Each structure stands twice: as structure tokens, then as C-alpha cells.
Amino acid sequence: MTTSSLFGLVLAGGKSQRMGVDKATLEFHGKPQVVWAHEMLAAVCECAFVSVRPDQVNDPIRMRLPQIVDLQPGIGPIAGISAALTQHPDSAWLVLACDLPFLSRTTLDHLIAQRDPKKFATAYRSAHDGLPEPLCAIWEPKSLVRVREWIALGKECPRKLLIHSDTALLDQPDARSLDNVNTPQERAAANAVLT
């Protein structure tokens, strides 16, 4: 079986309502998170893109990076995943949320090394509840049809999609690596650790 090429996608199209400011622009490593995450993916994938809503195309930070524009904005991360799979349907996609400041290269390398292209996707189990982590996962080309069906049914949760699909699940090499930052309190806590 031939393994599809691996492209990278940083999900940066969210509205950051709980944070109150654009999470993609927060800096934990001396540069905006979206830039830092894109660089992480570009180092391990054939090419890497940033997922944006149509109204973010000309954002000063996002416009410096290769973009994939949501085709169905307003439905959350699944819109970015769907747009990427649609634009490059023969490639697998390592999808990454932009709000993972604790992510390590080790975590990405392990995910890629354990990738199972025969499955719908390869994902980590959450260190908190054991459920699939869809926003640091490899989505195979075959997932496109199922993603489209999921959206057509009015469903938007990529985690539930992975739960109900043939997903390879891995334990995280670093339990904190996929902790995200959604609120000002979580931002302050991350800054205390990372700076």
C-alpha cells in the first residue's frame, strides 16, 4: 500500500471568544502561535498551510503564510479539515490547533512514526479523558467522504467523528503536550511555565 504524502494544517480560523483576543496571535515562544505552529508543521510535513475564515485572509499575520480558506465558515475546526481535504484530496493531513503552546517536536515525530494509513485517522488519546484528540491528528485521504457526510448531517464535532470512525489511537509521549490555552487564566498559567 502506498502511503499518501503528508501535508500540515494549522487551524487558525476560530473566533477565540473565551480568550477575548485572537489566540493565533498570542506569543509563548517569541512569535505568534500561528507562526510557531506553522513552523513546527513545515519541519515535519511536505508542505504546511494555515486554515482561515474568508474574513481572515488579509489578516497581517495570517497573510504571510500559505492559506486554505474555509469553504463552510461558522462550523468550527471541521470546516478547516474539510477545506484542506477538498483542496488536496490525495494527501493526508496532519491537523494541528494553533493554541497548543506545550507541543513538542517529539509529539509530532511520534504521531508520524505511528501513522496507520489504513485507518481513517491516527490520533492521540487525550491525557485527560482518553478520547481522541482530533486537533493533533493525521487525517487520511479516505476521511474526506466521511467528513463531508458528517457536515451534511449537521454535525460539527471532529472528536465525535473520530470516535465513530476507524481511528488508530496512540498514547501521548508527553501528557502535557496537547494542553491547549483557551482562557486568560490558562494563558497566564502557560506563560508562567514557558517564560
Image (cartoon, rainbow, N blue to C red):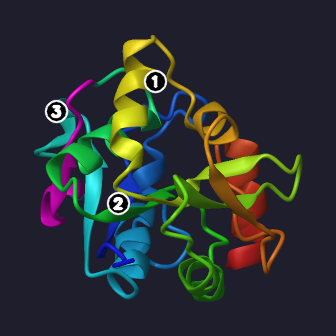
Give the residue number, with chain letter if any, for mark 3: 54
Q: Of callouts 3 and 1, which one flags the residue occurring earlier in the amino acid sequence? A: 3
The residue lying furthest to the top in this view is 154
Question: Tag 2: residue type?
Answer: Leu
Q: Of callouts 3 and 2, which one flags the residue occurring earlier in the amino acid sequence? A: 2
Q: CA distance from mark 1 to mark 2?
A: 20 Å
Q: Nearer the viewer, residue 100 or 20?
A: 100
- Identify which residue is drawn at 65% across, 80% down: 107
Q: Quadrant of the N terminus?
A: bottom left
Say if the magenta span includes residue 163: no
Question: Tag 1: residue type?
Answer: Trp
- Identify which residue is drawn at 17% across, 31% down: 55
Q: Nearer the viewer, mark 3 or mark 1?
A: 1
Q: Nearer the viewer, residue 134 or 99?
A: 134
Give the residue number, with chain letter if any, for mark 2: 9
Q: CA distance from mark 3 to mark 1?
A: 22 Å
Question: Tag 3: residue type?
Answer: Pro
- Identify which residue is drawn at 49% across, 35% down: 16
Q: Nearer the viewer, mark 1 or mark 2?
A: 1
Q: Which numbered tag is attached to residue 150?
A: 1
The magenta stretch spans which residues? Answer: 62-72
Q: Nearer the viewer, residue 87 or 34?
A: 87
